[in-house]
Image: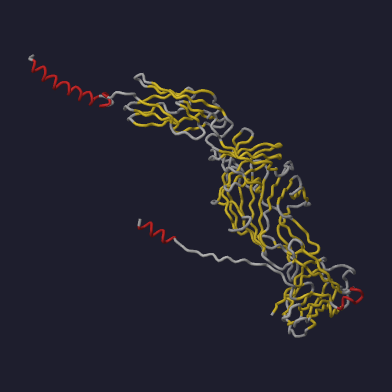
Amino acid sequence: MQREQVIRTLLFFLPSLVFIIALTAPGGDYAFRAGPLAEVAVGQLPYYVYASDKTLHLYSSPYAPWPYPKAIEVKLFYPTTVFISSTCGAVAASSVGGAPGSYFVDVVVPPGFQGDCWVNFTHTSGWRDAVLLRVKLVDWYPGATERAVVTLNGSGWQFVQVGQGGTLYIWERPMAQIPVVGCVFVYNGSVLLTETQHYREVVPNLIPPAVAPSSSGSVRYGAFIKLDGASQLYIYKADCPTAPRLNVSGPPPLRAEIGVTLPTPTGPVFDMPVVDNSVTYATGLRVINYTEASARIYRLYVYTYSTPVGLWGAVLRFNFALTALLTVKISLFRPGGELQRVGDVWIYRVGNATYWIYGPQPHRLCEPPCGVPAGWQEPLYVVVDPTGQWRGWPKVVAVRREVLQPWRS
Amino acid sequence: MAVLLGAAALFAAVSIINVTYWYVNTTAPPVTKYVGDDTNVMNGTFVKADWYYDADTGLNITRIYVVGVPGDVVNITNALRVCNNYNVSVKVRISDVRLLQDFYPNNTYIRDMVVKIVEPPSAADNKVQIKDERAIDTATDYVTLAPGQCAILGVDLVIDAYAPYYKTLAAFQINIEKVPQ
């Protein structure tokens, strides 16, 4: 072969070889690129994670996996795939990659884990990198940044609710203002089953508002706790944990003497309410029956609710017309028995059942006659204990706010 | 952008709030009720009156006791005086009669009770009536009281002869309406 033929062959063959390699290589023209395969860096972290170099100081929770979305970023410079593994099962994805670009890896720390955990990134070429997760177990609900710590002192089952405005309700009765509103209740080391129920103002612009359960409106989150002395309830600013709906039967009918005695030309009559409309709502924990009723000189807004703990409750709100009538009996609620005053509540005992009532005096005989009430009366909050074991509303001893801070800085 | 401006103009509004403040003061009632002269008969055996305060409603409630004699007709001509306190005339009438309490619901002891405006005698209908413990006439016409003038109310009572002695039989709410002129 002559020298010119060799030169001509090389001039044709070498570019063709390069072209064929570029065409057939999995990475295309990346086959001729120099530099690292990929870079592993810290991704998008919440403020409570301290990161140094490729070490993340994370929290874990005893209650649930603690997710750190997009915690690690992998910048891939080649069209290839990087394999991922974790020594603690913190990464669900087994690989990232495909086209060159930036990829985020979600980290989910398993519940109860504490210690060091490596997240390893490897490639068949021998390239490798790693991120160290230093994990501290903390008594905190995962993902929440703040919580309210409510110290309650009481006994027995209590139904606690938190309204969007920060009001803490116990058996529907407003008891305190708390600084954090959320749907996660942790008590005695357990995440509680919760309900979500809307409430609306049945008549707008009243002070205090006349509210009732509704299909829309302001949300309250509720849960049941069983108190035994002073203890702390933690309310986290977090979405409701998923839970099955409990099978709870509806509340019993509200059997009670309700009304006022009115004078009429033909004799005194007892002005009892007649139901206008009634709606039932089923939450995850309760069945609520809301009823509006009317009588000659007042309108009654009442809801009763059943619970999975044996007790049941009711809230009654009266709106009386302004009249010049006298009466000898005002019975806002009297299920029977003698009315007793114990502390700031009223109590009826009927058989084995005890009716606990907070609000205006539920039953009164006027001798001499007294005026019929006028306008909106304060709400009556009723808790009915069929067994006689309940001991009343608890005391709210203290309320404070706690914010999650990085455990190393 | 034009659509957005149009939407903004649609929702734009001007409101002006005028601030007022309301003093709530008090004055004397237009009329004052006084016991009638018949309260002096037998030391108030047949008529006496007092008042009490209902703390829950804030009402001042006048209580009048009238006493009948079972089997006899009792005419009390000066049971209660209602006097105009104002320096303008006031119209007065009995506006409502209702049975408030019946202490013997199984018996009809109050056979007849007529409360009437004895003075001034200007009302065409000057009486209300309770017959067999049911109010059958519940309002009078107005009488006009000049400043300082008093209306005098009387009561006629017929109590069943078999009614018990020294007992309260029933209580009626009788409202007196006052309209300053």
* Residue B167 figure quarter: bottom right
Q: What residue occupies the far front of the structure in this picture?
A: A409
Q: Nearer the viewer, residue A384 or B154?
A: B154
Residue for point 64% across, 34% down: A188
Residue for point 74% across, 78% down: B86
The image shows residue A387 at horizontal and vertical percentages of: 73, 42
Q: Number of numbered discs present?
A: 0
Depicted B104 relative to depicted A307: above or below: below
Q: What residue occupies the far right of the structure in this picture?
A: B42
The image shows residue A180 at horizontal and vertical percentages of: 58, 42
Residue for point 73% across, 48% down: A355
Depicted A96 relative to depicted A387: above or below: above
Q: Quadrant of the C terminus of chain B?
A: bottom right
* Residue A60 figure quarter: top right
The image shows residue A251 at horizontal and vertical percentages of: 64, 48
Q: Quadrant of the N terminus of chain B?
A: bottom left
Q: What residue occupies the far top of the structure in this picture?
A: A1
Q: Nearer the viewer, residue A112 or A213?
A: A112
Q: Is residue B141 visible?
A: no
Q: How is the image coloured?
A: secondary structure
Depicted A401 relative to depicted B35: above or below: above
Please indicate whether residue A237 sits to the left or right of residue A390 in the image: left
Residue for point 13% across, 21% down: A11
